[in-house]
Image: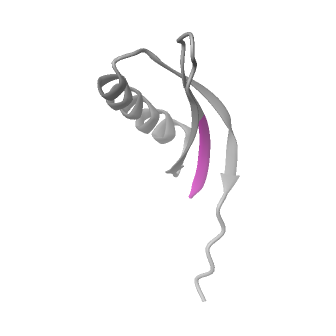
Amino acid sequence: MKQYVFAFYTDQTKPVVWEETILASGMMEAFSKVKALMKKYKREKGVPIRVQYKGVLYRYTDIA
């Protein structure tokens, strides 16, 4: 699994910026999760939300 990092922000006079880390097995899965989050945040905040892809973190799990 990889951790995809996205920056969410609002375009207002006083912008709000925050980062989310999405745990996904691929880029398409991460994008679909981000799209769902965008809809959720837009409903909660009542303003358009923009997203910027920041990068990927690889998570190594020890199975021993």
- Nearer to us in this view, 12 or 53: 12
Vertical placement of residue 12 versus 23, above or below: above
Give coordinates of residue 29: x percent, y percent.
Answer: 46, 41
Residue at screen point 31% across, 29% down = 44
Q: Which residues are magenta?
A: 1-6
Q: Is residue 36 above or below residue 60?
A: above
31 or 18: nearer the viewer: 18
Main secondary structure of the magenta stretch: strand
- In the picture as drawn, the residue positioned furthest to the top comes out as 13
Q: Does the magenta segment cover residue 35?
A: no
Residue found 66% across the figure and 68% down from its top: 60
Q: Is residue 64 positioned above or below 7 on the image? A: below
Residue at horizontal 56%, vertical 58%? 1
Q: Residue at x 53, y 12 (%)?
A: 12
The residue at the far front in this view is 14
> Looking at the figure, which quarter contains the C terminus?
bottom right
x and y percentages locating residue 57 in the rendered image: 68, 52
The image shows residue 39 at horizontal and vertical percentages of 34, 26
Q: From the viewer's perspective, is residue 5 above or below residue 62?
A: above
Q: Can you give x and y, in whole percent of width and height, for residue 4 in the image?
A: 60, 44
